[in-house]
Image: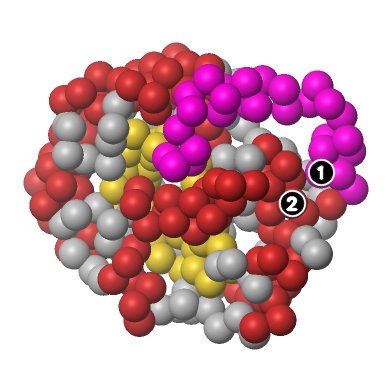
Amino acid sequence: MKVIDSHIHVSNIESFKYTANNISFLDYSSSGLKEEFQKSGIVAAIGMGLTEQKPDGFPDMTSPNPMMLDLEAEIPGFVAVCPGINPVLLERNGSAELDNIEMVLSRPDVVGVKIYAGYYPYYVHDKVYEPVYLMAEKYNLSVVIHGGATYSDRCCLKHSHPLEVDELAVRHRYLNIVIAHLGDPWVMDTAVVVSKNDNVFADLSGLVVSDEVGIRKIQADRLAMEHVKQALVYAERYKKILFGSDWPLAPVMPYIEFVRDLIPEEFHDDVFYNNALKAFPKLNDFLAVNSYFIPERLHFGAQFA
């Protein structure tokens, strides 16, 4: 079985480098990503665009729009892109920013846009984002919204609460929206929004930031992810839940096994592959010409035999 990682990072962000070196203990580079994918049976991924103008600067109010993947000069071809939006410059500069954004959103490797709710002091339904949402609809792109806790203490959590997505989903019924991280810790609120709105999905990225040993410990702790399991059961929408690793915050293969334990076996095909194609319609076109070659022996089922 094939796997799509719907949420990774490939950006030159100091906190990502620190996490990779000191917490998840992995090689945060294009070659490291290729190696992880080969081990894990992943055929494609979606990179969330993000930049900072100085080390530890994110959320950076000066990062130009749109924010892209800038870890290295060349990013692996099997990584599609959700460019990130800096609403501060968008509000300040208006049409000039929108011109830059639209130029990128029309590219074939772009499958969505990323709104960093909480990291920037705007609600997701703020009027500053409205032109971006209209562009997303124009180019058949999805919108990924950061949900839940933020790692920076410079942020306001009220802006990243998943209930704020409900108003946006009602206003834009034909726009696919993905709440990242299941909105953790407000997972039950995310479950309500996903269950209520046909156009809202959620990914399971970033629930654990650790190395393989730490992930195994959490798997063995019956209560550690009980709130997540309750939310998934409450929503009863396994066909709207996506796998994502939030790489480099966790090694991919152990995280796949971690998520696998959260999902009933009958929905593994959907969560690990099919749902990404529904949530990101343009990803189908991307995969037609871009995917990572996985030897037959590395198909999903063999990983857990």
Residue 214 in the image: x percent, y percent?
Answer: 86, 42
Of residue 221 and residue 154, the one placed in the foreground of this image is 221
Q: Residue at x 83, y 35 (%)?
A: 218
Earlier in the chain: of badge 1 and badge 2, it is: 1
Query: Residue 224: which quarter of the image?
Result: top right
Packing grade of label 1 (10 A; few <14, some 14-19, many >=20) is: many
Whether the magenta-drawn stretch holds residue 235 is answered as yes
Q: Secondary structure at mark 1?
A: helix
In the image, taking residue 110 as reference, residue 235 lies left or right, namely right
Position of residue 28 relative to residue 261, above or below, is: below
Colour convention = secondary structure
Name the residue rendered at 35%, 81% in the picture.
289
Q: Amino acid at mark 2?
A: Glu
Is label 2 in a helix, a strand or a loop?
helix
Q: Nearer the viewer, residue 207 or 104?
A: 207
Using the image, tell me which numbered label, if any, was put on residue 91.
none
Kind of residue at badge 1? Ile
- What residue appears at the point 54 percent right and 56 percent down from the top-left corner? 269
Q: Quadrant of residue 109?
A: bottom left
Residue 230 in the image, given as x and y percentages of width and height: 62, 21
What residue did someone put label 2 on? 257
- Give the magenta-colored segment's residue range: 213-241
Residue at 74%, 70% in the rendered image: 302
Distance from disc 1 to disc 2, alpha carbons, whole Å, reads 9 Å
- The C terminus lies in quadrant: bottom right
Which callout, 1 or 2, points to the residue nearer the camera?
A: 2
Residue 156 shows up from this direction: no
Dominant SS type (magenta):
helix
On the picture, is 24 further left or further right than 78?
A: right
Residue 270 image position (x, y, % from top left): 49, 51
Dots 1, 2 in contact, CB < 8 A = yes
Q: Which residue is mark 1?
A: 215
